[in-house]
Each structure stands twice: as C-alpha cells, then as structure tokens.
Amino acid sequence: MAYTVNINGQDRELDVPGEMPLLWALRNELDMVGTKFGCGVGLCGACTVHVDGTAARSCSTPVSSLAGKKVRTIEALAETPTGRALQAAWLDEDVMQCGYCQAGQLMTATALLDRNPSPSAQQIDTAMAGNICRCACYTRIRDAIAMAAEKGTANA
Amino acid sequence: MLEQAILSRRTLLKVGALAGGGLAITATMPMVARAATGSAAAEPAVLNAFVSITPDNVITIVGKNPEIGQGIKTMLPMLIADELDADWAQVRVVQGDSDARKYGPQIAGGSFATPMNWMPMRQVGAATRQMMVAAAAGRWGVDAAGLKTELGKVIEISSGRSATYGELASEAAKLTAPEPASVKLKDPKDFHIIGKAIGGIDSPRIVRGEPIFGVDTQLPGMVYAAYERAPVFGAKLKSAKLDAVKALPGVLDAFVIEGKGGAEQLVDGVAIVANNWWIANRARRELEIEWDTGEWAGHSTKGYNDAARKVMAEGKPQEVFATAGDIDAAFASAAKVLDAEYAYPFLAHAAMEPMNCTAVRHPDGTLEMWAPTQNPQPGHAGVAQMLGIGQDKVKLHITRMGGGFGRRLTNDFMHQSAAIADKMPGTPVQLIWSREDDVRSDFYRPAGWHRLRAALDADGKVIGFDDHFVTFAITGGQYNPAAMSPTEFPARFVPNLRYGQTKLDTRVPMGALRAPTSNAMAFVMQSFLDEMAHASGKDLPTLLLEIIDGGAEEPATQGFTGRTPGFNPARMRGVMERVMANSGWGKPRAEGRAQGFGFYFSHQGYFAEVVEASLTTRGQVQIHDVWAAGDVGSTIINPFGALNQVEGSIIDGLGQAVALAIEIEGGAVSQSNFHDYQLPRIAFTPRIHVDWVKTDYAPTGLGEPALPPVIPALTNALFKLTGKRVRSLPIDPKLFV
C-alpha cells in the first residue's frame, strides 16, 4: 500500500508495508542516508528525526503513523535557525570523533533548544539522555549546546 | 611487529615512483580525477602518491589510514601540509583506497599511526615543498637558496615576487624527487599547522548528514542483505528450509553460505536479500535452520568462572613465563603476605555503526568493495584468497567508520559480504548487521582471572610478587589479545617474581578491544598494588615511586601491549607528579567523596589518572572529576583530536568499570542490545581535566593509553571511600550496601 509522508517539506510517496520503520523508508527507499541506524529499538538515538518538531526515533516510527505529520531529517536541519546555530557550535567545539551518532545528537539538541532556548546543564543532560555517543564526546556535546544557546539564533 | 610495520624512509616516495615512473606521474590517479572539477584547466598535477595540486591552488592530500573517529584523516595530512608549507584552508583530504604498494601500511590499530608516520609523512611534505622551490628556481632562473615558502606560495626573498604552488605544480611534477632522507625538515618552532587545534576534516559534511560512512554507500541497483549465523560459537549449519522466506513479499532471494576458515573469515549462515534491509532482516524470523552445536553449547561464563577458580585454588600454573630471584624464599621470609583473586569479563566493542560492507562482483570477474575496516590490507588479501582470485582483482575502498575500538580489525563482515556478492554477479549488495548481530558476533575482549600474591618485608617493602593468570587458549591462529607480557609491571622492579598462566578452552571469538590486554591488566595490577600500598601504610603513588626508584630506561624492544618498548621510569614519575599536583592529591575532599590513583604505560604512552567519586545510598557509583596527565612525547599534533581521544578513553574505561559485561550461556552471548549492554550516557560524564607532560621524545599515539589507568583509579577511590575492594568487574553495587 502506498503512503504519503511529508519529509523536509515535500510529499513523498512510499509504497512499503505500513509497519516499515521510517528509518528504513528514508535510507533504503528514498536514499536519504543521513539518518543513522544504531540499534533498531529506540535505545540509542542515532536515528532521531523531528516529527512535527519533536524528536522521534525513526527506527521505531512506522510509516503508517505519519499521515498528516511533518518529518524533518538531518538533511534539512540547516533550514532552521536553531539547526544552523547548533551545526556551527558542533564545528566550533569540534564535538565529534567518529561522527556516526551526531545526526541524531543534533536533531535531539535542536528539538531541545526549539522548546527551551536556555536550558540548564541538568536540562541538557536530561534531553540528551537517549542519545548514545560510543566515542563519548559528551563533554563537547554539552558545551556545544550551551554555546549555541548562549549565542542564540539571531545570526544563525 | 611495530618495527616490521614501520615504513623505511625510502619507501614512501619510492612507492609513488613505482606507481608511475618517477614522481612526475603523468597518468592521473582515479581518485584525484573524481575530486577534480572536470575542466582541463583544473586538472591536478600529481606530485607523488600523497599530494596533487590543481592550477587554481587546491592541494589534495591522501589520508592513507582508515578513519574510525581517532582523527587520523585530519592528522596525517596535517603532517604533510605543515612541512609542505601549505595553507590548511587550501587543503582537501581524500581517503586512500587499500593499496599497500602505493601507501605502505594502512591500519587503524595499536595507536601505531603517530609513531609510524610522524617522520615519513613529514618527509613527504618536505620533499614536495622542495620540488616547488626547485620549480620556481627553474622558472625564474635563480638559486633556490634565495627562495622561501609560505602558505602555498614560493617567494623570492630579494624581490618579493611569488608564485603559487598551483602555478608551479605541473613543472614541479616533472622534476626528480629528492631523497626523503636528504630533505631538511622544519625546526618544530616553525610548525604552523602541527600543534594547532584543527577541526575534523569530515565534520562539516557530517553535521549536514552527507553520506560518508560505510553503511551510507549507495550504488545503482544495490540490494540489501541480512545474514543469519549460529548463535552458538563454533556451530555448523546442518540444514536450512528457505522456501517460506523466499515466498515472503519483498524478499528477492535467500541462500546458504558455507563457512570457510575460522570465525575471522566466514562462518556458516543464511543470507537473505531484499530491496530494503528491514524486509531482509525481518524475514529471518521465518527461517528454519538446524545447527550442529557440538560440545560448545555446554560452555558458559559460570563454567569458565568455576574452572578458573579451581585452577587458581590449586595454585599450579600450566606454564611459568617470567621469573626473577627466589619467589618461594621471598614468601617464606615475608613479614606480611597478601593473596587476592581478580576477575574481569568478556567485553563487546559495540561501535555505533553496526558491521556492514558493500560489494559487487563485476562482469569481468573483479570484485569491488566498500568496507568500513580498520585493517584493510589483510581483509583485501583474505577476500581474494577466499574467492580464489588475485588480490589485484579486488578493488577495496576504505570508508569512514562509525567507530572501531578494535572490532573492525577483524574482517569477517568483509568475507560475508564478498561471499554474498559472489552469489549474485553484477548486483551490488550491502550487507548490514543488526545491533543484535553486532553484540552477539563480536571478537570479544577476553575474560580473565588472576590470583595475585605479594610478599612484604617488615618495612613494607615489596620483596615478592606472584601472579597466576587464568586465560584462554586462542585457537585458529587468532591474534592473542590476552597475552600477558613477561615484563608486565612490576616485573624487573621486584627482586623475586613469578608470572604463570593456565589456559582454558573456549570457542568464544576474541580480539583486540581498545588498549588490548592493558584495559584489563591495569585494573588488576594497579588495584593489587593499591592493596599492597595500604597494607604498608602508604598511598599508591608513594609505593609506585619507591618501586621504580633508581630504575633505568628500558631499551626499545618489539611488542606493543602492556609495558611497551622503551619503558622509562622517569617519564612515569613525570606524569604521576603532574597529576598529583593538578588533582590536589592527598588533600581532604568533600564529605562522602574520595580520590583514587592509577598509572599505566601502554602503546608507548604514559598516563597517570586520579578519579574523584562518591556512592549513592543504593551503591551506585558517581564520578565527579577525573584528572589525567599524559606523556606522549614532544608534540601534541592536533590538540583537538588529542583531547577528544583522552576524554573518550576515560569515559569508555569508566563505562566498562561500572556497567559492561558479555556473558556466555549455552555457548552463546546472553546480551543483545543497549538495554543489557549499557554504554555510558551523557549524565554519567564527569568533569575531565587533561594535562600534557611534554618530553623530548618523538610523539606517540593516543587512541588507547589513556583508558587503562582510569579503571583502577576509580576502584581505588571506592576502596578509600568504603574500605571495600573491587576485585571483579563490572563493579557490583551490592558490594557497597
């Protein structure tokens, strides 16, 4: 059965089983591989996207659940001021080692700053708790989010 | 091994010469052609195997080693670019394919890359620079001595006229390359890139979500494969019913793959192929496979523990591999004897990017692969051998990797991918493992057990040291990641000593995990040394400094685990003193907190670390601060990458200490995903204070040596806090409640 899903502002047709996770529709049907596979069961956050602006695990989000919703992926993160501010902070802080989890980290961090532009250190840790970084770049993830929050999005 | 792998200074430019006849290579390397804009004017001049320059002054440098997040794709080109006197802003880096002839060794492992490449890469840059100068001298008809270079330009000192490298490159490429050994290298005070904090070269692409990892490889007509293998290690496939799977909607094919070689090559299994990996993977539940598990299904962690405890109690090692003095006399005359058993579990690597590999068997019989491998050259040879074709018939692209930690040194996934592609000629196929496959089909850090005894005299001086190490017999020619060095500290510094070992049988595949051997040995030895220190009324640093007092620098020898070549007690003292000063060691801490100390020397790096920890009422460990002082020689090549490696190693080690274990039950791994293999998360992260002790030695690597000492530093802190000694990992909170 065909589903229509709005991804990064475009309606995309997906002729897949409705229970197919969004992650695999993105990666293998639409060739959008920026969203990463880490665990398949919502434990690591590597596959995080935004659904109606909220961070969601695409590995556990069936395609059939997305009717009428707006999905944003890492490929379109730079279209938002918060996303641009965080991408810049990520580079300024040289956050990453391997970088594989960072799309998910950035999507979660963007959802955080969009709803709470000045999070406390505790709020940053709480919001990012679902995103594993196996290289453990956590000190820099904290610093980059704090830096982006401090600078704001005015010039982003 | 290290010495064998080190490139001779001649090799690098010579391999470039072999590839194309002098350094003036006229045939453009394919990789460079792809990077070029396509217009004839921008066609790059290829200076050697590593450097090509376009007329518009873009310098493309090949990063030859696999990038797993250790920063090598940034760092090795920095060495070339600095000596070349390039402007880093004009540098592009491309990943080199697997090509031993062109690039020499290509491996991400053992923290080798820095010591192996520090000189050769600089020589490549300096030789290329010299060719630029010679080209300008030729063009202007002047003496090269009157010319200097700066940020990608040659400048005549007297007149100030200049030419960019881009303008000179095609002329330079026609010149004979200088002898690498004859090329003058920079005085370190003139470095303009080395020593600067430089961001990861791929990071801008990564924050945009661009395809760059192995699993992001996309080819026209590509299909996806899942691979079902036996959960029990060593099992063979007896029979498989595939009809139900083949009939599932979306499944393109399913077939049996017969194993070849050991676990590190190809194990028996069933491949399922679909246009979408989720379809292929989900179809596995319809498989009906009968496995012959043989005797191995009876193996378990409990069985290994029981066997180890039994042989440790019996006290007779199968073999003694290091002795000094008269150990029995030392214990007979001791004023105090300590006797303790230590243990640590199997560990998985759990890199974030699950194992995967993409391959296509072309109509001409060649195989092309895109492999996230830390160790491409053996994988390249192994796949060619498995398929019975020449290695020149296998084209191997090295992709960026979502972590390695030693897992991708073993290329079983490459063999699987090649075997599947071999059954589907002309169709590119991407093999992806699920997280469960990844956790359950690893090459694990070996579990181990130690019965340690120490003899102290009436003054608390160590007069005897005895270790009975219980480990595993490694079968199938695997690299032995559990090998304990006969020089493991405090050997050589204690008058009477004996190291013996007994080996248990297993089929659990084992491999190198970041800081192999050291990641376990540091916990055992530095904890027991802390026990010895407390037994004689001292702290651990005091005891360690007493033990090494008067010790001389050890001559460099081969080998890279444990106390690696050239151990120098003075450098050990240097990092110890620095971390004690930085951490306020010995001063009172806040109520409910305590500091612990650990030192370890591995992979040619010296690290002393102090952990400050507390416990919740439920016995959960809380880590507040970690201080680290490291000595990896004269130069921190990229302070960004270096700090990231040290911080990552520290959190990695702490995570192992508090939470991680792989258990065997019924011959298979019990854990499966991140709910029962719980990696550290952000809230666990302490404040980390890193400091460098710079010494007059050539720089060495940072992928590993900061990890080992943090584990005993934590457990020693917990002892100070509670009087309870952690002798088994991971730390059991019940010990403290």
Image: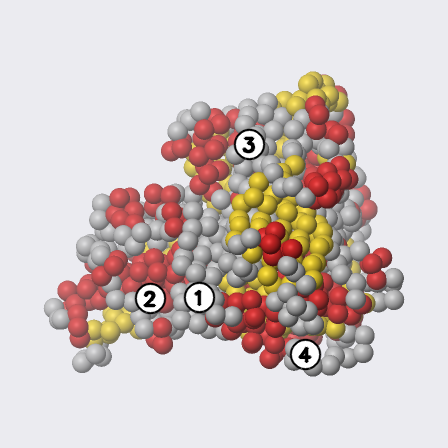
The residue under label 1 is B552
Say if mark 1 contacts mark 2, CB within 8 Å: no
The residue under label 2 is B83
Upstream in sequence: badge 4 or badge 3: 3
Q: Chain of mark 2?
A: B
The residue under label 3 is B476
- State which mark lies toward you, 1 or 4: 1
**As rendered, which of B262 and B710 lies closer to the eye?**
B710
**Residue at position x 42%, y 51% in the image:** B558
Q: Secondary structure at mark 1?
A: loop
- Per the model, the C-alpha gap separating discs 4 and 3 is 49 Å
Residue B689 in the image: state x and y as whole percent. 62, 73
Residue A72 in the image: state x and y as whole percent. 70, 56
Vertical arrangement, residue A101 with respect to residue A153, above or below: above
Q: Chain of mark 1?
A: B
Vertical arrangement, residue B546 with respect to residue B680, above or below: below
